């Protein structure tokens, strides 16, 4: 793992909290809903494949939403989301494994567990269809990818540059997310995805993560090769309190339809 000192203070404190959290008891065994199938189904239905994220708050959000996570997830699916991402990190994102379990029972699309899983024990906390592995934060990515698959999970491996992409491909990752937000300054730059995407083999499911806020951003990431987009803030709209999550999702899932407003 790279040294923590290059990380934003908020990220360092997230990692410290993650190292202190205990893993689950026993080994999880998941019968996962296929993400590639769900993305293809959205595409066949004329929707942009969007993974909408239930993120009550975050270090970069300008507020928090107290809504019931299940209602939020259902509203996202009603807006055309192909899959749901759920933050389970408790100390900085307001998430919980219990919320994920309730959401996975309520919707029939794949559910991604978004957390800072650093070792095998961290995988055994809750059943999900996918969970995130952040290349920069783990020592033996290949072993964790294998351990994830042994449990039935589809690992989503996050990278931020071409060097990390190489590591992810060598570890056998076949679902890769390029995070447009850098973990040093927490700044978003959509060019990150554009610079990494051309190096990704065609048989990898490629996801553009973070910073997608408008239909124009959706089209920009799709033009650069995104099979799907992972969107949190623009859908949760933290500052606005009761903003319509279904409408926020629909605006993005319809970004490639002719009748959409093109802004
Ligand atoms: O809210 P945004 O900018 O749409 O980003 C969503 C998602 O990409 C972001 O929450 C995220 C990407 N990688 C992470 C790792 C941990 C926690 C959160 C994340």
Image: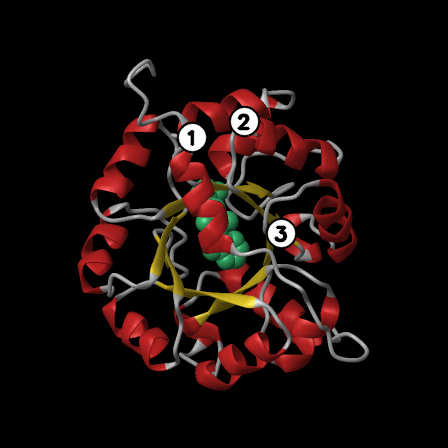
**CA gap, disc 1 to disc 3?**
21 Å
Q: Residue furthest right?
A: 25
Mark 2: secondary structure: loop
The residue closer to the viewer here, 236 or 84, is: 84
Q: Quadrant of residue 245?
A: top right
The residue closer to the viewer here, 119 or 228, is: 228
For the N terminus, give its image quadrant.
Answer: bottom left
The reply, left or right, for residue 2 in relation to residue 192 is right
The residue that appears at 43% across and 23% down in the rendered structure is 251
The residue that appears at 58% across and 69% down in the rendered structure is 15
The residue that appears at 19% across and 64% down in the rendered structure is 199
Q: Quadrant of residue 116?
A: bottom right
For the residues bearing labels 1 and 2, Cβ distance under 8 angstroms: yes
For the residues bearing labels 1 and 3, Cβ distance under 8 angstroms: no
The reply, left or right, for residue 263 in relation to residue 103 is left
The correct choice, above or below, for 24 with respect to 33 in the image is below
Q: Label 2 belongs to which residue?
A: 79
Numbered tag placed on residue 253 in the rendering:
1
Q: Position of residue 117 (x, y in %)?
A: 59, 70
Disc 2 crowd rating (10 Å Cα; few below 14, some 14-19, many 20+) is many
The correct choice, above or below, for 115 with respect to 235 in the image is below
Numbered tag placed on residue 87 in the rendering:
3
Q: Position of residue 63 (x, y in %)?
A: 60, 34
The reply, left or right, for residue 199 in relation to residue 30 is left
Numbered tag placed on residue 64 in the rendering:
none
Q: Under 8 Å from ligand 1: the CB of mark 3? A: yes
Disc 1 crowd rating (10 Å Cα; few below 14, some 14-19, many 20+) is many
């Amino acid at each position: 793992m790279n040294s923590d000192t290059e990380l934003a203070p908020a990220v360092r404190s997230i990692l410290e909290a993650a190292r202190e959290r205990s893993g689950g008891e026993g080994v999880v065994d998941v019968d996962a809903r296929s993400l590639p199938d769900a993305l293809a189904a959205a595409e066949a239905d004329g929707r942009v494949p969007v993974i909408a994220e239930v993120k009550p708050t975050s270090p970069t959000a300008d507020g928090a939403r107290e809504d019931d996570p299940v209602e939020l997830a259902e509203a996202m699916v009603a807006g055309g989301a192909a899959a749901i991402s759920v933050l389970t990190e408790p100390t900085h994102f307001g998430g919980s494994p219990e919320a994920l379990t309730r959401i996975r029972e309520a919707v029939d699309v794949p559910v991604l567990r978004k957390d800072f899983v650093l070792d095998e024990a961290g995988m055994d906390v809750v059943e999900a269809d996918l969970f995130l592995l952040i290349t920069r934060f783990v020592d033996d990515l290949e072993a964790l990818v294998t351990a994830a698959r042994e449990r039935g999970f589809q690992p989503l491996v996050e990278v931020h540059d071409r060097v990390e992409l190489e590591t992810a491909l060598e570890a056998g990752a076949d679902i890769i997310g390029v995070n447009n937000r850098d973990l040093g300054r927490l700044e978003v730059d959509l060019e990150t995805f554009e610079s990494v995407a051309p190096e990704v083999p065609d048989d990898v499911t490629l996801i553009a993560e973070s910073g997608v806020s408008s239909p124009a951003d959706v089209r920009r990431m799709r033009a650069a090769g995104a099979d799907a987009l992972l969107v949190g803030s623009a859908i949760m709209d933290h500052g606005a309190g009761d903003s319509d999550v279904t409408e926020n999702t629909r605006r993005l899932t319809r970004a490639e339809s002719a009748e959409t407003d093109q802004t």
